[in-house]
Image (cartoon, rainbow, N blue to C red):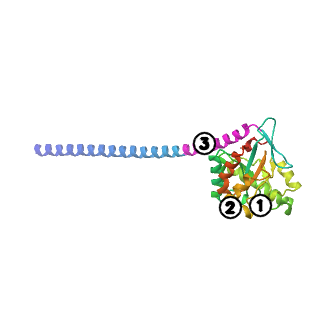
Amino acid sequence: MKRTMLLSSVCVLMLAACQTQANQQVDETEESSGQEQNDETNTELADEENEETAEVETDESEDQEVDEQEQESEEVEKEYRINDVIWTVEPIDEADAEVVLLTIDDAPDKHAVEMAKTLKEKNVPAIFFVNGHFLHTDEEKEKLKEIHSMGFEIGNHTATHPDLKAISEEEQREEIVSVSDQVEEIIGERPRFFRAPFGSNTDYSRELVAEEGMTLMNWTYGYDWESDYQTADALADIMVNNEFVQNGANLLMHDRDWTNEALSDIVDGLRDKGYDFVDPHAIK
C-alpha cells in the first residue's frame, strides 16, 4: 500500500515537472515569437523611416539644384543688352563685341533636347523659347527640365503661337502669362525673355512683357523656315555665310529636323569666323 502511494506521488511529481517544463517552453516560444514580431515591426518602421528620409533628401536635392541654378544666373555679371530697334546684342562697357547669340524657338518639340546636348558638348549657351502647347504631358515637362538642367535659359514664346496682332488684349495676356506660369511650375523660375511669334508685337504685348519683368526679343536673321534652306547643308551654309553675320547678331533657329542636323556645323562655322557666343544669363 505504501509502495503504491509512493509510486503515485512520484508520478504526480513527474507530471508536475513535465507540465512546468512545457509551460516554460511555451513561454520561451511566445517570448521568442514576440521578440521576432517586435524585430520585424522595428525593421519595417526603420525601412519606412529610411524611405521617408530618402524622399526628403531627394526633394531637398532637387530644390538645392534649382536654387543653385537660380543663384548662378543671378551671379553672372550683366555685360550685354538687347538693342530694341535692330535686335542685336550690344556690349555694356568693355564686354567682348565679337559675339553672336543663339536662340531656338518652338521648344520642346521633337529635337530640342538633342539640340541642347549638342550645344552643351560644344560649350555653347543659348535661349530655348518654349510654347505652352509643348508643355502639356509629363514627357514634355521632363524635356524642359532636362534642357534647363543643362544650364540653358528658357524663354517665353506664347501658349499657342498666334499672331498677337490678330487677337484681343485679354487673349494676349493669356497667351503670355500662362506660359510664364507653366515654366515656373516646371523649372522653378519664370522666363526672363519673350519672343512673339512671327516677331509680331503690339503696344499691349510690349507693356505686358515689361510688366512681367521680361526682356523683349526679336532677331537679326534666320532661315530654317524657308523652303530653300530645309536641308542641313543649305541651312548651315546660309547661317554662317550671309550679310547679317556681324558683331551682336541675334540668330533665330527652330526645333526642326534640318536645324538639328545643321547645328554643329553652324557653331563650328561661326567659331571659325572668330565669333564667341553670348551667355544669355549675361544679358541685362
Residue 3 part of the magenta-drawn span: no
Q: Which mark is residue 161?
A: 1
Mark 2 crowd level (few <14, some 14–19, many ≥20, 10 Å Cα): some
Q: Which mark is residue 132?
A: none
Q: Is residue 125 visible?
A: no
Which residues lie in the magenta part?
52-78
Residue position for label 2: 231
Front residue of 227 and 5 = 227
The mark nearer the N terminus, 1 or 3, is 3
Tell me whether circle 3 and circle 2 mark residues in contact (CB < 8 Å): no
Residue 249: x %, y % from top left: 78, 48
Image quarter of the N terminus: top left
Amino acid type of the residue that numbered disc 3 sits on in the rendered structure: Ser
Image quarter of the C terminus: top right
Q: Dot 2: what SS?
A: loop
In the rendered view, does 278 fall on the left or right side of 199? Answer: left
Residue 162: x %, y % from top left: 79, 62
Residue 235: x %, y % from top left: 71, 57
The mark nearer the N terminus, 2 or 1, is 1
Q: Which residue is at 43% across, 46% downward?
A: 40
Q: CA distance from mark 1 to mark 3?
A: 35 Å
Residue position for label 3: 61
Residue 165: x %, y % from top left: 86, 61
Q: Which residue is at 37% across, 46% downward?
A: 33
